[in-house]
Image (cartoon, grey):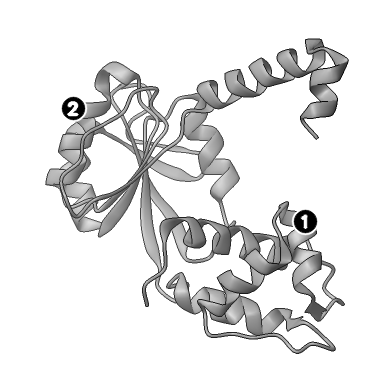
Amino acid sequence: MNISNKVLGRLTRYRALLTEYFPKEKTHIFSHELAAMMGLSASQIRRDLMCLGYYGVPRYGYEISELVKYINEILDASKLHHVAIVGAGNLGRALMTFLESRRATLKIVAAFDEDPSKSNRMINGVPCHSMDAAEEILRREDIRIAILCVPGSEAQRVTDRLVRAGVKGIMNFAPVPIRIPVGVALEEIDVTSALERVAFFTNNRANAPKERRHADR
């Protein structure tokens, strides 16, 4: 099934809303309800769900349990993925706690850090190892996904090691872009940059002339 990256991203958000935030007694949802929560149009929601081959009923909308089942099948939710955190600093530790049991098919099984005081111990319930052992443990634990929480100066070197060890997907929190070979999936998340953009637009909107603010509507 050919689904674009943007649609895939929205499907993950639909699933999170439907499984984590909706009351358990609610069994059906209309496209306009989901659209209101997502800040999208109802037609966009319907187009996305049509990609799954799932259609709602005009009178009742979409059956939530069935819709989640269809999304799970597309996102390969039946397969368990082992994940590693690389960099057990503040961000890495926070992600270990945040992601624990959040998605049954994504399991953090190892962490790595070059600080000797953090290796060979449990951190937030996750065994943390020296980077020198990374290749061996990544292969032994069949870890194909890594979350990169290292300084920018180390990001590319660490990425190269992960790829050599067989990692096929990387989420990069380092504040620099990284280069990856064809066949490796990459998501880059720059939290500081995103927050700075929010601050910039908040400041400019607050100080904009009244006429401009009306014109933006």
94 to the left or right of 114: right
**Callout 1: 10 Å neighbours few (<14), some, many (20+)?**
few
Instruction: Return the mark for residue 157.
Output: 2
Q: Nearer the viewer, residue 26 or 78?
A: 26
* Element at label 2: helix
Residue 96 in the image, given as x and y percentages of width and height: 51, 42
Picture quadrant of residue 118: top left
Q: Position of residue 169 (x, y in %)?
A: 30, 51
Q: Answer whether residue 124 is visible to the viewer in this image.
A: no
Q: Residue at x 50, y 45 (%)?
A: 125
> How far across and down, in percent of the image, does residue 21 sit?
77, 60
Are circles 1 and 2 on residues that touch, CB within 8 Å?
Answer: no
The one nearer the camera, 121 or 22, is 22
Q: What's the residue at 56%, 79% (across, down)?
A: 50
Mark number, residue 37 = 1
Q: Does 90 sit left or right of 139 as displayed?
A: right
